[in-house]
Image: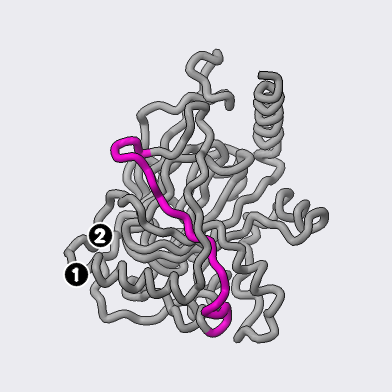
Amino acid sequence: QFKQKYCDKNVPCLIRGLEKSHFKDISSQWRKSSIRQIEMYSEPARGVISDACNSNAAPSANSQTIVNTEWFSTFVGDDSAVPVRINNNQPGRGSNLDDDGRAQECETMEMKLSEWIDECRDHEEQFHASGRSGERRPRDNIGYLKDWHLVNFLSQRNESLPSWPLYTTPSFFQRDLLNDFLRRYSDGGDYKFVYWGPSGSATTLHSDVLHSYSWSYNVVGMKKWIFHIPELQRDNDDDDGRGEHYNSKQFEVIQNTGETIFVPATWKHEVFNLLETISINHNWITAANVDLSWQCLLTEISSIETELQS
């Protein structure tokens, strides 16, 4: 049902009901209670898509939780290096795309996990003390720990963890050509990430790598997603090389703690952390989008050849 309604049609979906069935251990270990009052958004989407694989599942009740940093200090290690990206987005631009529509790399710096935890704590204290809690606009020069291959790192020391695996991939996300290929033929590479961003941090306008699908589970926190609806074109005018033109039509989705979102292939989107948020994110390719991934590779190869000849 999920494949037919969302993968085959290539449309977004907000999913509830996976917290206890697939993410129970990671949710219990990475969260702790907070005395801070957190506003809970009851409408998960405004505009187009809102659905649940379990239609009877209620929104998560864990609306007053924060990141359990003690778990990370204990089982990851305070001295472990983490990749922190800095958003130097130009005011009013709203995107980090270059002139050819490709995502530009953010400035990346490595810091110790203990330094990142301290930075997040200081930022959250200033953020909430200033009355900006729930602010929905991206802010510049905020660090964002993203594309962190934490699960791969922990798999090498899983005997020391309270439970392993920390989560299981839902069955409708499991037919994964991309990560299965990398597991067999690369030296430990994968597209399975942890994202950890403070309030006000953001990922600017982009579409996902290799025209893959992606899913994101919010362990802690709250995100606002802005999806830009692609419109199919009959010709190649105003085309970004993907057979789709991106117009001004868009809609927002609020993702709360314990909710999962499915991101379709080629859809450009922006993501804002309304609260300090930590999430599990996988990119994956399956039979429903492998043709798009193949076309993406051909386009990139052609671009490289053109640059080499110039």
Find residue 161 and report its horizontal and vertical position in percent.
62, 84
Is residue 129 part of the magenta span, yes or no?
no
Dot placed on the residue nearer the N-terminal end, 2 or 1: 1
Q: Which residue bears the numbered disc 2?
A: 134
Pointer 2: residues within 10 angstroms few (<14), some, or many (20+)?
some
Q: Amino acid at mark 1?
A: Ala
Report which residue position mark 1 lands on.
129
Which SS class for mark 2? loop
Residue 88 in the magenta stretch? The answer is yes
Q: Which residues are magenta?
A: 74-94
Note whether 198 is above or below 68 in the view shown.
above
Instruction: Name which residue type carries label 2.
Output: Gly
Residue 61 higher or lower than 148, as above or below: below
Residue 145 percent coordinates (x, y): 48, 61
**Residue positioned 63% across, 63% down in the render:** 169
From the viewer's side, name the closer residue of 151 and 140. Answer: 140
Is label 2 in contact with label 1 (beta carbons under 8 Å)? no
Residue pictured at 37% horizontal, 49% vertical: 253
Q: Is residue 239 left or right of residue 163?
A: left
In front of the other: 248 or 119: 119
Indicate the quadrant containing the C terminus: top left, top right, bottom left or bottom right. top right
Residue 265 x %, y %: 57, 40
